[in-house]
Amino acid sequence: MKRILNKLFSKLVLGGLIIILQFSWFVYLLYSATVYSSMVDALFKIASIVLALFVSSRDMRSTYKTSWIFLILALPLFGIPAYYLFGRPGLTKRTRMKMDVVSSRIRAYSSPSDDVMSALRAEDDSAGQQAQYLTCYAGYPVYREADTQYYCCGEEMYPQFLEDLKAAKSYIFLEYFIAEPGKMLDAIVEILAQKVKEGVDVRFMYDGIGCIQTLPNKYYCYLQEKGIKCACFQPFRPLMSIIQNNRDHRKITVIDGKVAYTGGMNLADEYINARVRFGYWKDAAIRLTGECVWSFTSMFLELWDYILKIESDYTFYRATSMEKHRLQEKIHADEKGFVQPYTDSPLDHEDVGENVYLNMISRAKKYLYIFTPYLIIGSEMRTALVNAAKSGVDVRLVVPGIPDKKLVYFLTQSNFPYLIKNGVKIYTYTPGFIHAKCFVSDDVQATVGTVNMDYRSLCLHFECGVWMYRTRAVLQVKEDALKTFAESHEVTLEEFQKKSFLVRTFMGALKLFAPLL
């Protein structure tokens, strides 16, 4: 009973109810005005047409543009306020300017190496084009001499993660979308508290919406009492506001400028399968060492400085990172490839995460294997996947067998028929839920990160990842994919066609609401 009451009176439920009441009141006022005044009704219809024309002129994906135009014209009382809340960029011009200042300040310390880029171009010009794109539009250079270790699940990564935290001498930076007290987080906090006593600078950054149901009230005070510095990105406020759209969905750990982790894993027990949620929880993480760690250090500091309105000593952290790189253990003998961390931000109109995926799809020659928890994609991504399959590329996607969000899973399934008809193989992960976000192709390139194949992740959130060319981890991702296919079920067109007409119609209708999901 206590657990049920806690859920009923949680911040998310109460805050959500307040927002729904505000939204409903706003819609009611609009409805009342249109009912009792023919002039207001006419003005409202004109406004819906003007807004639809405005949306059609916006630089956004055609699929989502069509969805918004339909909602605005067909259901104006719902569509107009919904667009106000969910359709617009959530960061104001002033906010963008502030973040641009911080970004330009720290990225001055991430100068690209012409020698490394030239070496990559000489080896593979196509890969060099991907690296050039990321350098120009994500703002972080490509590196050599990086050690990469891929982990196919949380429990495989966790012991090494704890050992790296225990070995910290200078600083530990953690940035996560979700954190929840339990076996995993409690053990991490215990280590962090001990490190603070040893003089290590420990910082923890989390997202205000991602942690709204998982972290107790004033948890940051609990951490601060232990000497752990905290920052919350855009705390939840129960107001109809567009700032709720943009979340910090990144997962980053940096230790001493020497070791970095990223991938799909958050800090909660299901990620190491210490708690069962949706069957077996399959995720992915990658451990990096080498000079490339500086890119993740600067990603963290950029957002940290913006939230706390401070200016970190970037010279110190850059020098520390370089020194650690020089003193670190010898790079694994198999590591002769290239590594390029990247971030994606709603600050600009450049969808870096999606373009990394599209570039890999278009350049694949033999195979392309994909892990994704969600498949809410626009026509551009669908067309790219189909064109690759029609060109003879073995394109395979793995999605969850047990979903975490049923509505979203219906929308994911609605993409199956078109893709399967055109040669794309789709697998559902039989043991449970797959939360990994990975692409690998042709034994030469892979990306592991936080970017889901859905509208919010591709357009609205702060995301990150690492693109790799001919590194040890590339083949590790491939090996994991092959094992995962063997554990999964390949979906057939006949299976989908056995679904009832009502279910298929419902799936099709859901596509109109894709931007909201």
Image (cartoon, rainbow, N blue to C red):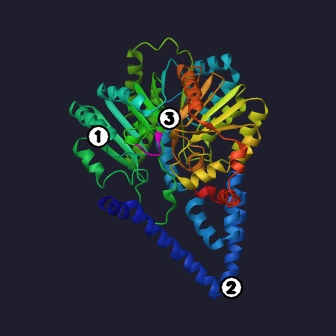
Segment tinted magenta in the rendering: 276-280
What is the spatial separation of the Cα atoms under label 3 and label 1, in whole angstroms? 34 Å
What is the spatial separation of the Cα atoms under label 2 and label 3, in whole angstroms? 53 Å
Quadrant in which the C terminus is drawn:
bottom right
Amino acid identity at mark 3: Arg
What is the spatial separation of the Cα atoms under label 1 and label 2, in whole angstroms? 61 Å
User: Foreground: 316 or 212?
Assistant: 212
Residue 200 seen in the figure: yes
Q: Nearer the viewer, mark 1 or mark 2?
A: 1
Q: Nearer the viewer, mark 2 or mark 3?
A: 2
Disc 2 target residue: 39
Amino acid identity at mark 1: Asp
User: Foreground: 466 or 430?
Assistant: 430
- Magenta stretch, main secondary structure, is loop
Horizontally, is 216 left or right of 434 in the view?
Answer: left
Along the polypeptide, which appears first: circle 1 or circle 2?
A: 2
Quadrant in which the N terminus is drawn:
bottom left
